[in-house]
Amino acid sequence: MKTRNLLITLFLVVIALAAYGYFFVYHKAHADIFKATPDFTMEATELFEAFRADEVKANERYLGKIIRLSGSVMDLEMENGEISAIRLDVGELLDGVVCEMDKIYMRETGEIGIGDEVVLQGVCTGFLEDVIINRCAVVEIN
């Protein structure tokens, strides 16, 4: 009988820990990118050149950091009538900095057009021919 009670108690503790992990760790809210203080503020060309010159060093410095970028809009990707990604011009025909919009801020992109000067803020996630910035929010449109 003692073994049975011990097993039931152990089972309930494991279920409680799993529930805690599921609700409070797995579903933890992300930091609000728009309100967060950026780790770095720079031009899109400066970030792109850092990755092109030395990708390993740039990954160590920028990967996972909140970056505020300014630059000219080279291309827009649309999804359901809203801007889902903004490619910033870095002086290369096929390469750039791709800022994938956070779904929370997709509607706040306003009237952005190709050639507009913008300031975006997001999390750097690496380099795949383009520098990829995720969870972006538009800070300013010039």
Image (tube, rainbow, N blue to C red):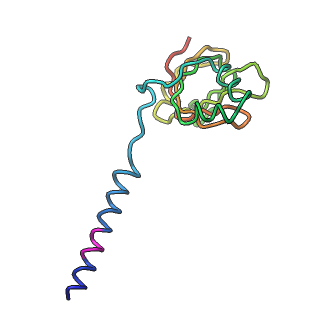
Q: Is residue 12 magenta?
A: yes
Q: Along the line of sight, which residue is nearer the eye, 141 or 37? A: 37
Find the residue positioned furthest to the top.
142
The residue under the point 54% across, 26% down is: 67
Which image quarter: residue 91?
A: top right
Could you tell me residue 119's position as x and y percent?
Answer: 55, 18
Could you tell me residue 103's position as x and y percent?
Answer: 50, 36
Find the residue positioned furthest to the right.
93
Q: Which residues are magenta?
A: 9-13
The residue under the point 58% across, 31% down is: 62
Horizontal relation, residue 33 to residue 75: left or right? left
Rendered-image quadrant of the C terminus? top right
Could you tell me residue 109's position as x and y percent?
Answer: 52, 24
Q: Along the line of sight, which residue is nearer the eye, 19 or 104? A: 19
| Visible residue check, residue 51 | yes
Q: Is residue 27 above or below residue 95?
A: below
Could you tell me residue 86's position as x and y percent?
Answer: 62, 27
Horizontal relation, residue 78 to residue 39: left or right? right
Which image quarter: residue 111?
A: top right
Which image quarter: residue 73?
A: top right
The residue under the point 42% across, 39% down is: 30
The residue under the point 63% across, 37% down is: 126
| Visible residue check, residue 84 | no
Horizontal relation, residue 111 to residue 21: left or right? right
Q: Is residue 45 magenta?
A: no
Rendered-image quadrant of the N terminus? bottom left
Most frequent secondary structure within the magenta stretch: helix
Picture mark count = 0
